[in-house]
Image (spheres, rainbow, N blue to C red):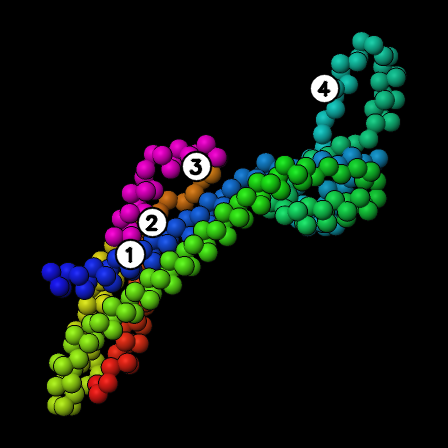
Amino acid sequence: MKLFKNHFSVVFSLFVLLCSLQFVIFVNKVIKEYEKYLADDYSVIISASAAIDEKELIEYKPVIKSIEIIDLENTLSRFKDDVTLQHMEAIKESMPKFYTLKLDRFPSASIANSLKNDLLKYPSITKVEIFAKTYNKIYHMLKLLDFIVTVFAIFIVITSLLLIVKQMRIWTYEHQERMFVMNLFGASYWRKSAVLYKMAVTDSFLASFGAAVIFFLLDKAPTAANALRELNIAVPHFNIFMEGSILLGIALVISIVSTTLAMMKVKQV
Protein backbone atom coordinates (compact mmCIF):
# COMPACT_ATOMS: atom_id res chain seq x y z
CA MET A 1 0.00 0.00 0.00
CA LYS A 2 2.85 2.35 0.87
CA LEU A 3 4.58 1.56 -2.42
CA PHE A 4 1.34 2.27 -4.27
CA LYS A 5 0.98 5.65 -2.54
CA ASN A 6 4.55 6.62 -3.35
CA HIS A 7 4.17 5.73 -7.02
CA PHE A 8 0.66 7.17 -7.28
CA SER A 9 1.83 10.64 -6.18
CA VAL A 10 4.43 10.89 -8.94
CA VAL A 11 2.39 9.11 -11.61
CA PHE A 12 -0.68 11.24 -10.98
CA SER A 13 1.34 14.49 -10.90
CA LEU A 14 3.12 13.59 -14.13
CA PHE A 15 -0.17 12.48 -15.68
CA VAL A 16 -1.88 15.81 -14.88
CA LEU A 17 1.16 17.76 -16.09
CA LEU A 18 1.32 15.87 -19.40
CA CYS A 19 -2.43 16.20 -19.94
CA SER A 20 -2.19 19.96 -19.35
CA LEU A 21 0.64 20.34 -21.87
CA GLN A 22 -1.13 18.18 -24.45
CA PHE A 23 -4.37 20.08 -23.95
CA VAL A 24 -2.58 23.39 -24.61
CA ILE A 25 -1.09 21.89 -27.78
CA PHE A 26 -4.53 20.65 -28.84
CA VAL A 27 -6.17 24.05 -28.24
CA ASN A 28 -3.38 25.78 -30.19
CA LYS A 29 -3.96 23.38 -33.10
CA VAL A 30 -7.70 24.07 -33.02
CA ILE A 31 -7.15 27.83 -32.95
CA LYS A 32 -4.62 27.72 -35.80
CA GLU A 33 -6.93 25.57 -37.90
CA TYR A 34 -9.86 27.89 -37.18
CA GLU A 35 -7.73 30.90 -38.09
CA LYS A 36 -7.00 29.19 -41.41
CA TYR A 37 -10.71 28.67 -41.91
CA LEU A 38 -11.39 32.33 -41.08
CA ALA A 39 -8.61 33.43 -43.43
CA ASP A 40 -10.21 31.44 -46.27
CA ASP A 41 -13.66 32.74 -45.39
CA TYR A 42 -12.52 36.31 -44.76
CA SER A 43 -12.21 38.71 -47.69
CA VAL A 44 -11.58 42.37 -48.30
CA ILE A 45 -13.73 44.15 -50.86
CA ILE A 46 -12.26 47.06 -52.80
CA SER A 47 -13.55 49.31 -55.55
CA ALA A 48 -11.27 50.88 -58.11
CA SER A 49 -11.66 53.43 -60.85
CA ALA A 50 -9.48 51.36 -63.19
CA ALA A 51 -8.36 47.78 -63.62
CA ILE A 52 -5.84 46.57 -61.05
CA ASP A 53 -2.80 44.48 -61.82
CA GLU A 54 -2.84 41.45 -59.48
CA LYS A 55 0.92 40.91 -59.29
CA GLU A 56 1.56 44.58 -58.70
CA LEU A 57 -0.93 44.79 -55.83
CA ILE A 58 0.41 41.61 -54.19
CA GLU A 59 3.93 43.03 -54.38
CA TYR A 60 2.60 46.22 -52.82
CA LYS A 61 0.96 44.29 -49.94
CA PRO A 62 2.41 40.75 -49.62
CA VAL A 63 -0.27 39.82 -47.06
CA ILE A 64 -2.67 39.58 -50.02
CA LYS A 65 -2.83 36.02 -51.32
CA SER A 66 -5.12 36.42 -54.32
CA ILE A 67 -7.31 38.94 -56.14
CA GLU A 68 -10.55 38.16 -57.91
CA ILE A 69 -12.70 40.59 -59.84
CA ILE A 70 -16.40 40.68 -58.95
CA ASP A 71 -18.56 40.03 -61.99
CA LEU A 72 -21.42 42.56 -62.19
CA GLU A 73 -23.02 41.05 -65.28
CA ASN A 74 -25.79 39.40 -63.29
CA THR A 75 -26.65 42.68 -61.60
CA LEU A 76 -26.65 44.67 -64.82
CA SER A 77 -28.66 42.02 -66.66
CA ARG A 78 -31.67 42.92 -64.53
CA PHE A 79 -31.83 46.28 -66.32
CA LYS A 80 -31.22 45.07 -69.87
CA ASP A 81 -34.92 45.41 -70.73
CA ASP A 82 -35.07 48.98 -69.44
CA VAL A 83 -32.04 50.49 -71.15
CA THR A 84 -30.55 50.29 -74.60
CA LEU A 85 -27.40 48.33 -75.38
CA GLN A 86 -25.51 51.59 -75.90
CA HIS A 87 -26.55 52.90 -72.50
CA MET A 88 -25.69 49.54 -70.93
CA GLU A 89 -22.15 49.75 -72.27
CA ALA A 90 -21.88 53.32 -70.99
CA ILE A 91 -22.99 52.18 -67.55
CA LYS A 92 -20.37 49.43 -67.56
CA GLU A 93 -17.65 51.91 -68.47
CA SER A 94 -18.68 54.39 -65.80
CA MET A 95 -19.07 51.86 -62.98
CA PRO A 96 -16.07 51.21 -60.70
CA LYS A 97 -14.38 47.83 -60.74
CA PHE A 98 -14.94 45.67 -57.67
CA TYR A 99 -12.43 43.11 -56.39
CA THR A 100 -12.31 40.49 -53.65
CA LEU A 101 -8.99 40.16 -51.86
CA LYS A 102 -8.00 36.97 -50.03
CA LEU A 103 -5.29 37.19 -47.39
CA ASP A 104 -2.62 34.63 -46.50
CA ARG A 105 -3.65 34.73 -42.82
CA PHE A 106 -6.44 35.99 -40.65
CA PRO A 107 -5.61 39.64 -39.82
CA SER A 108 -5.63 41.18 -36.38
CA ALA A 109 -7.35 44.55 -35.93
CA SER A 110 -4.08 46.44 -36.35
CA ILE A 111 -3.12 44.52 -39.51
CA ALA A 112 -6.60 45.00 -40.99
CA ASN A 113 -6.56 48.75 -40.35
CA SER A 114 -3.02 49.08 -41.68
CA LEU A 115 -4.04 47.16 -44.80
CA LYS A 116 -7.05 49.43 -45.34
CA ASN A 117 -4.97 52.59 -45.00
CA ASP A 118 -2.29 51.32 -47.37
CA LEU A 119 -4.82 50.16 -49.97
CA LEU A 120 -6.51 53.57 -49.96
CA LYS A 121 -3.14 55.07 -50.87
CA TYR A 122 -2.83 52.77 -53.86
CA PRO A 123 -3.59 54.46 -57.22
CA SER A 124 -7.10 53.85 -58.58
CA ILE A 125 -8.47 52.27 -55.37
CA THR A 126 -11.32 54.43 -54.12
CA LYS A 127 -12.91 52.41 -51.32
CA VAL A 128 -11.96 49.49 -49.04
CA GLU A 129 -14.26 47.40 -46.87
CA ILE A 130 -12.46 45.16 -44.37
CA PHE A 131 -15.45 43.89 -42.33
CA ALA A 132 -13.34 44.34 -39.20
CA LYS A 133 -16.02 44.46 -36.52
CA THR A 134 -17.54 41.04 -37.17
CA TYR A 135 -14.31 39.13 -37.57
CA ASN A 136 -12.31 40.92 -34.88
CA LYS A 137 -14.75 39.71 -32.22
CA ILE A 138 -14.10 36.13 -33.26
CA TYR A 139 -10.36 36.75 -33.43
CA HIS A 140 -10.22 38.24 -29.93
CA MET A 141 -12.34 35.39 -28.54
CA LEU A 142 -9.85 32.90 -29.95
CA LYS A 143 -6.89 34.76 -28.48
CA LEU A 144 -8.64 35.06 -25.11
CA LEU A 145 -9.33 31.33 -25.10
CA ASP A 146 -5.70 30.60 -25.95
CA PHE A 147 -4.50 32.91 -23.15
CA ILE A 148 -6.84 31.42 -20.52
CA VAL A 149 -5.91 27.84 -21.38
CA THR A 150 -2.18 28.64 -21.37
CA VAL A 151 -2.29 30.44 -18.00
CA PHE A 152 -4.37 27.65 -16.47
CA ALA A 153 -1.93 25.04 -17.79
CA ILE A 154 1.06 26.95 -16.39
CA PHE A 155 -0.45 26.89 -12.90
CA ILE A 156 -1.13 23.16 -13.20
CA VAL A 157 2.40 22.47 -14.46
CA ILE A 158 4.00 24.45 -11.61
CA THR A 159 1.84 22.68 -9.00
CA SER A 160 2.61 19.28 -10.52
CA LEU A 161 6.34 19.98 -10.58
CA LEU A 162 6.30 20.97 -6.91
CA LEU A 163 4.46 17.77 -6.01
CA ILE A 164 6.89 15.66 -8.04
CA VAL A 165 9.96 17.26 -6.44
CA LYS A 166 8.41 16.83 -2.99
CA GLN A 167 7.72 13.15 -3.63
CA MET A 168 11.27 12.65 -4.93
CA ARG A 169 12.61 14.09 -1.68
CA ILE A 170 10.39 11.69 0.27
CA TRP A 171 11.92 8.85 -1.73
CA THR A 172 15.43 10.02 -0.90
CA TYR A 173 14.58 10.19 2.82
CA GLU A 174 13.17 6.66 2.70
CA HIS A 175 16.36 5.36 1.05
CA GLN A 176 18.78 7.62 2.92
CA GLU A 177 19.96 4.92 5.31
CA ARG A 178 20.65 2.48 2.47
CA MET A 179 22.53 5.15 0.51
CA PHE A 180 24.52 6.10 3.60
CA VAL A 181 25.70 2.50 4.03
CA MET A 182 26.57 2.23 0.34
CA ASN A 183 28.46 5.50 0.63
CA LEU A 184 30.60 3.99 3.43
CA PHE A 185 31.61 1.19 1.11
CA GLY A 186 32.54 3.67 -1.63
CA ALA A 187 29.61 3.09 -3.95
CA SER A 188 29.31 5.43 -6.88
CA TYR A 189 26.57 8.02 -7.22
CA TRP A 190 24.73 6.06 -9.90
CA ARG A 191 24.81 2.83 -7.87
CA LYS A 192 23.43 4.58 -4.81
CA SER A 193 20.65 6.34 -6.70
CA ALA A 194 19.82 3.58 -9.20
CA VAL A 195 16.66 2.54 -7.35
CA LEU A 196 15.29 6.09 -7.32
CA TYR A 197 16.00 6.64 -11.01
CA LYS A 198 14.41 3.28 -11.81
CA MET A 199 11.25 4.30 -9.93
CA ALA A 200 11.25 7.68 -11.71
CA VAL A 201 11.58 6.05 -15.15
CA THR A 202 8.84 3.52 -14.36
CA ASP A 203 6.47 6.27 -13.23
CA SER A 204 7.27 8.27 -16.38
CA PHE A 205 6.24 5.33 -18.56
CA LEU A 206 3.02 4.83 -16.61
CA ALA A 207 2.07 8.54 -16.67
CA SER A 208 2.85 9.07 -20.36
CA PHE A 209 1.03 5.87 -21.32
CA GLY A 210 -2.05 7.00 -19.37
CA ALA A 211 -2.02 10.49 -20.92
CA ALA A 212 -1.54 9.07 -24.43
CA VAL A 213 -4.45 6.65 -24.01
CA ILE A 214 -6.73 9.40 -22.68
CA PHE A 215 -6.06 11.72 -25.62
CA PHE A 216 -6.27 8.84 -28.09
CA LEU A 217 -9.75 7.99 -26.77
CA LEU A 218 -10.82 11.65 -26.70
CA ASP A 219 -9.68 11.99 -30.30
CA LYS A 220 -12.06 9.18 -31.23
CA ALA A 221 -14.96 10.59 -29.20
CA PRO A 222 -17.84 11.47 -31.58
CA THR A 223 -18.87 14.53 -29.55
CA ALA A 224 -15.56 16.35 -30.05
CA ALA A 225 -15.26 15.25 -33.68
CA ASN A 226 -18.78 16.44 -34.53
CA ALA A 227 -18.26 19.79 -32.79
CA LEU A 228 -15.06 20.46 -34.74
CA ARG A 229 -16.70 19.31 -37.97
CA GLU A 230 -19.51 21.81 -37.44
CA LEU A 231 -16.87 24.55 -37.20
CA ASN A 232 -15.19 23.33 -40.40
CA ILE A 233 -12.00 22.57 -38.47
CA ALA A 234 -9.80 19.68 -39.56
CA VAL A 235 -7.46 19.09 -36.62
CA PRO A 236 -4.77 16.41 -37.10
CA HIS A 237 -5.59 13.25 -35.16
CA PHE A 238 -3.61 12.36 -32.06
CA ASN A 239 -0.72 10.10 -33.09
CA ILE A 240 -0.39 7.78 -30.11
CA PHE A 241 3.09 6.65 -31.18
CA MET A 242 4.71 9.93 -32.18
CA GLU A 243 2.98 12.27 -29.73
CA GLY A 244 3.01 9.55 -27.06
CA SER A 245 6.79 9.36 -27.47
CA ILE A 246 7.03 13.13 -27.02
CA LEU A 247 4.98 12.90 -23.82
CA LEU A 248 7.24 10.09 -22.61
CA GLY A 249 10.32 12.19 -23.35
CA ILE A 250 8.90 15.14 -21.39
CA ALA A 251 7.99 12.87 -18.47
CA LEU A 252 11.46 11.29 -18.41
CA VAL A 253 13.21 14.66 -18.43
CA ILE A 254 11.01 16.02 -15.62
CA SER A 255 11.27 12.93 -13.43
CA ILE A 256 15.03 12.49 -13.91
CA VAL A 257 15.75 16.16 -13.28
CA SER A 258 13.50 16.13 -10.21
CA THR A 259 15.26 13.02 -8.88
CA THR A 260 18.67 14.60 -9.45
CA LEU A 261 17.63 17.78 -7.63
CA ALA A 262 16.30 15.71 -4.74
CA MET A 263 19.51 13.69 -4.58
CA MET A 264 21.57 16.86 -4.38
CA LYS A 265 19.75 17.70 -1.14
CA VAL A 266 20.69 14.42 0.52
CA LYS A 267 23.52 14.80 3.01
CA GLN A 268 26.41 12.38 3.26
CA VAL A 269 25.65 10.76 -0.06
- Report, in whole angstroms, how far the alpha carbon at label 1 lies from the one at label 2: 18 Å
Inspect the image, locate mark 2, and give the three-letter code of the amino acid beneath it: Asn
CB under 8 Å between discs 1 and 4? no
Report whether 95 appears left or right of 32.
right
Q: Which mark, by number, is residue 239?
A: 2
Upstream in the sequence, badge 4 or badge 2?
4
In magenta, the rendered stretch is: 210-232
Q: Secondary structure at mark 3?
A: helix
Of discs 3 and 1, which sits in the foreground?
A: 1
Of discs 4 and 3, which sits in the foreground?
A: 3
Q: Secondary structure at mark 4?
A: helix
Of discs 4 and 2, which sits in the foreground?
A: 2
CB under 8 Å between discs 4 and 3? no
- Report, in whole angstroms, how far the alpha carbon at label 3 lies from the one at label 2: 18 Å
Q: Quadrant of residue 10?
A: bottom left
Q: Which mark, by number, is residue 228?
A: 3
Name the residue tied to disc 4: 74
Compared to 19, does 199 lie above or below? below
Upstream in the sequence, badge 4 or badge 3?
4
Seen at 63% across and 36% down, the residue is 134
- Report, in whole angstroms, how far the alpha carbon at label 1 lies from the one at label 4: 60 Å
Upstream in the sequence, badge 3 or badge 1?
1
Of discs 3 and 2, which sits in the foreground?
A: 3
Report whether 176 appears left or right of 55.
left
Disc 4 crowd, CA 10 A, few/some/many (<14, 14-19, 20+): few
Compared to 226, does 75 lie above or below? above
Which is the main secondary structure of the residues drawn in magenta?
helix
Inspect the image, locate mark 3, and give the three-letter code of the amino acid beneath it: Leu
Name the residue tied to disc 1: 15
Upstream in the sequence, badge 1 or badge 4?
1
- Report, in whole angstroms, how far the alpha carbon at label 4 lies from the one at label 3: 36 Å
